[in-house]
Image: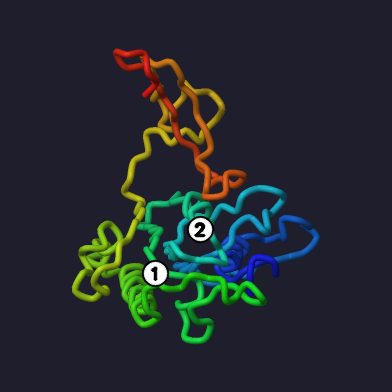
Amino acid sequence: MSLRDGLLGGEAVAIAAAFNRLSRYPDNALVRGDFGFSIKSIVAIAPSSGFYKPSGEPLKIANVDYLVIQGAHDADVATFLGTRQYHHVMFENDEPHFKCALYIDRANHGQFNTIWGVRDWSGPVHALQNVKPLITGDDQRQIALVYIDAFLEASLHKHRAYLGVFRDPRAAAKRLPAGVRYVAQYNDSSFTLICDFEEDIDAMTATLDGATVEARGVKEWREVKIPLRFKEENQDNKALIARGEDNRGDRT
């Protein structure tokens, strides 16, 4: 299945977790839900994002552990759309929770299983893909095995020593294939957020109650949505841009 075919499983698991806690279907409250499954952990592999927005809003899920994995050479889901859902996983109770987004260099879409293979495209363009840079399917699946195994141990069995793997992939170097680079984001419920620029359109306000934002000596100061690889799409996540001038008058 490709993005052209609509909603993918990696996005659907997050929707299932959100709907699991609702008593009514958000797009038609006459439809009852009330599932009540014990969903504690979610793993999404190269998910789509934004195909379905309940009541037109980004999908937010709370108080579950979340792992999303994406290959940097994915030719089907060609941007890391899973970062959107990563940013919309919230921790709102007193229980320990964590989330991780893992970006794997030279991994594609299909080699996470043993069937789809090295070419993510179908049809006439199938032969046009450059698959030489890809890591082997065995290596790609070993990476997924290591991370999903560690995730389930940390999440379901509460073996918190495994959390080091998500903070820094080098912690699992002995089990991971050599020569592969990773970019990982990690957060957990012990984190105190001061400012993420998401709370409103006022550049002076911060997320933490009582905190404010101030900038001096800058020529530009604004909050913007962080773009994805395709500029018309963004991460549903904001950042601060502050630019000044150096001694030559150049913008920095």
Q: Nearer the viewer, residue 105 or 240?
A: 105
Residue density around tag 1, few if under 14, some if 14–19, many if 20 or more, within 10 Å: few
In this image, 201 relative to 150: left or right? right
Q: Quadrant of residue 208?
A: top left
Query: Where residue 192 appears, x then y in whole percent?
Result: 34, 41
Q: Amino acid at mark 2?
A: Gly
Query: Where residue 107 appears, x then y in whole percent?
Result: 41, 69
Mark 1: secondary structure = loop
Q: Which residue is mark 2?
A: 82
- Identified at 79% across, 57% down, the residue is 28
Q: Which residue is mark 1?
A: 133
- Identified at 63% across, 75% down, the residue is 1
Q: Is residue 234 above or below residue 248?
A: below
Mark 2: secondary structure = helix
Query: Where residue 210 appears, x then y in whole percent?
Result: 40, 24
Find the distance from the CA under tag 2 to the CA under tag 1: 23 Å
In this image, 133 relative to 5: left or right? left
Q: Quadrant of residue 132?
A: bottom left
| For marks 2 and 1 on the same chain, the one whose residue lies earlier in the sequence | 2
Query: Where residue 67 appears, x then y in whole percent?
Result: 42, 64
Q: Nearer the viewer, residue 7 or 96?
A: 7
Q: Quadrant of the C terminus?
A: top left
The colour mode here is: rainbow
Q: Nearer the viewer, residue 15 or 32?
A: 15
Q: Amino acid at mark 1?
A: Pro
Q: Is residue 174 above or below residue 100?
A: below
